[in-house]
Image (cartoon, rainbow, N blue to C red):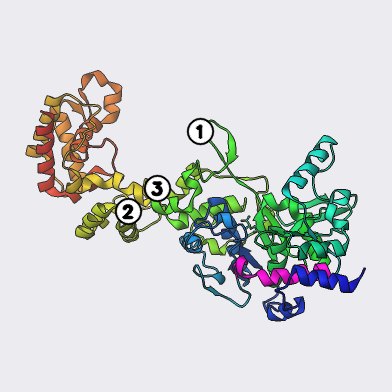
Amino acid sequence: MNNDKLTELADLMFPDVTKTIEDYEKMYPERNLPEGAIVTRFAPSPTGFVHMGSLLGAFQAYKVAKETNGVFYLRIEDTDQKRSVENGIVGILNDLKNFDIVPDEGMIDEEHSIGNYGPYIQSERMEIYHTFAKDLVLRGLAYPCFCKPEELEETREIQELNKERIGYYGSFAKCRTMDIDEAITRIKNGEEFTVRLKSPGDFNKKIVLNDLARGEIEFPENDLDVILIKSTDKLPTYHFAHLVDDHLMRTTHIMRGEEWIASFPIHDQLFSIFGFEKPKYAHLGLVMKIDENGVRRKLSKRKDPEASVEYYHKEGIPKDAVKLYLMTIANSNFEEWLDNNPDGDINDFKYDFKKISASGTLFDTAKLFNISKNYFGKMKAEEIYDNLLVWTDEFDKEFHDILVKHKDYAIKVFNIEREVEKPRKDYVSYSSIKNFVFYMFPEYFENPNYEFNKITDKEEIVNILNTYYDKYLDLSDKDIWFTKVKEMCDSLGYASNIKEYKKNPDAYKGNVSDVTGVIRVSLTSKTNTPDLYEIMKLLGLDEIKERFTKCINNIK
Ligand code: GLU
């Protein structure tokens, strides 16, 4: 091959290149990290939000980097300009931060980054990509391709018709064998071109991917002359950017979605051609859900609110509960670990690539909510109060002001059946709490919607409430309180002893739980609440009186 000609071609194709690959190797030397340290990254497009599936990936990448004293960095992949939105980076950073994922390096806002391996946004790495591509042209391993979309489409149709493998390879790769002089002339004439790899691969030979999550996967070698640099904006394709960036940023582990598995032969070939050390790969399964119709499908940002990270923030599901859940779907042995270490910190769990569920991860909100309930079950009342204050400040100002006004009282409300051996597990999120406690706040008890069920006769309800208030209401301690309630039952013809009642139900109007039910509903409007005695003690005699009166007036 004529080296002068190749140089002329390469210079024409990349007039902006001033450095060599060696220059970049020096600028971005191997990282000085302890043995076994993992360098990995999260590499989203600047779309402004993080999909739950991506968060799961970022979460795992962050975890392994931290565990090994490695590096986790954020690289913005904006080579597909269609996917970029305004403030798209800040949105991503916020979503990550909501789950305590703070990159060690990379973009920190729309324009700035930290770290020595940048730029961390692909559109600013143009010259770097061009340097690498130019090197390939000089070595006869890349060439300009002038094929128009129509021509490529035509080739594709022919391949389909003849049942041949689809793609730009072998004799279908028209520009591969173009005379250099012709290429030079066409570029000089201002013709648009892409830069393609002159693949040295043989489709009949095999290569193996040793996927950390999936084990060995065999592929034919790549023989496609894939596009490395696009024609219009001169930005790299994913394949080429992956090679250049992950090499120069010294990434050791690529944790990415399984949709990239099929491209592995291209990536492997590119690393071989340049003689670069190959990173390890773990391809993570898609995040799936079973929809209302029982169909298993991909979790979709468009259809499923739970697919967006913002949802958890808005719902007020504690981030630590979401993290516990994410770990259960990231590593199949985590749940067992958690059972054995109920108070364990996620940081003490050792991430295991072999326990990644490769077949796709089922996103199960019911399970997440369950984890969240357990999580709330372990929280102290004051902690709940503090966090709820933060949440309501953003999402429910009215409730926020009520909580501020009644701080000590609110903490006591949250403490009912809490900080005991078997705490109540009803709160699932900060947004759910109001529904469980609203009646404890007079502000929310102006127009109660009473849910009387067992005893519904109005006169009987009035009778029970009046009798109770006049003769039996005593809150001095729980035993006395209950003894009095039972005394009233006996006097009004209700069984105070449930066993007795069961033996002979016809002898009574009902039993003690029906009577406490009336008191409960009149004071809270609900049939199901935490401990009634605790509630009554907190409400106090004046409020009880007011609520009884309100109820009596209301049902009359
Ligand atoms: N920008 C790519 C994506 O979002 C990154 C894949 C990778 O991690 O290499 O799919």
Mark 3 crowdedness (10 Å alpha carbons): few <14, some 14-19, many ≥20: many
Point out the tag, 2 or 3, that comes first from the N-terminus.
2
Element under disc 2: helix
Element under disc 3: loop
Point out the tag, 1 or 3, that comes first from the N-terminus.
1
Point out the tag, 2 or 1, that comes first from the N-terminus.
1
Q: Three-letter amino acid code at disc 1?
A: Glu
Say the numbered circle drawn on residue 428: 3
In the rendered image, the quadrant that contains the C terminus is top left
Residue plotted at (90% across, 52% down): 205
Viewer-nearest residue: 70 or 16:
16
Residue 203 painted magenta: no
Residue plotted at (61% across, 66% down): 123
Q: Residue furthest right?
A: 1
The relative height of residue 537 versus residue 135 in the rendered view (above or below) is above
Q: How far apart are marks 2 and 1 (CA)?
A: 28 Å
* Residue 517, percent from left and from top: 23, 34
Q: Is residue 133 left or right of residue 552?
A: right
The relative height of residue 520 versus residue 345 in the rendered view (above or below) is above
**In this figure, which residue is indicated by the disc labeled 1?**
292
* Residue 319, percent from left and from top: 45, 57
* Residue 78, percent from left and from top: 59, 61
**In this figure, which residue is indicated by the disc labeled 2?**
395
Q: In this view, does 58 lie to the left or right of 200?
A: left
What span is in magenta?
120-138
Q: Three-letter amino acid code at disc 3?
A: Val
How many numbered marks, from 0 up? 3
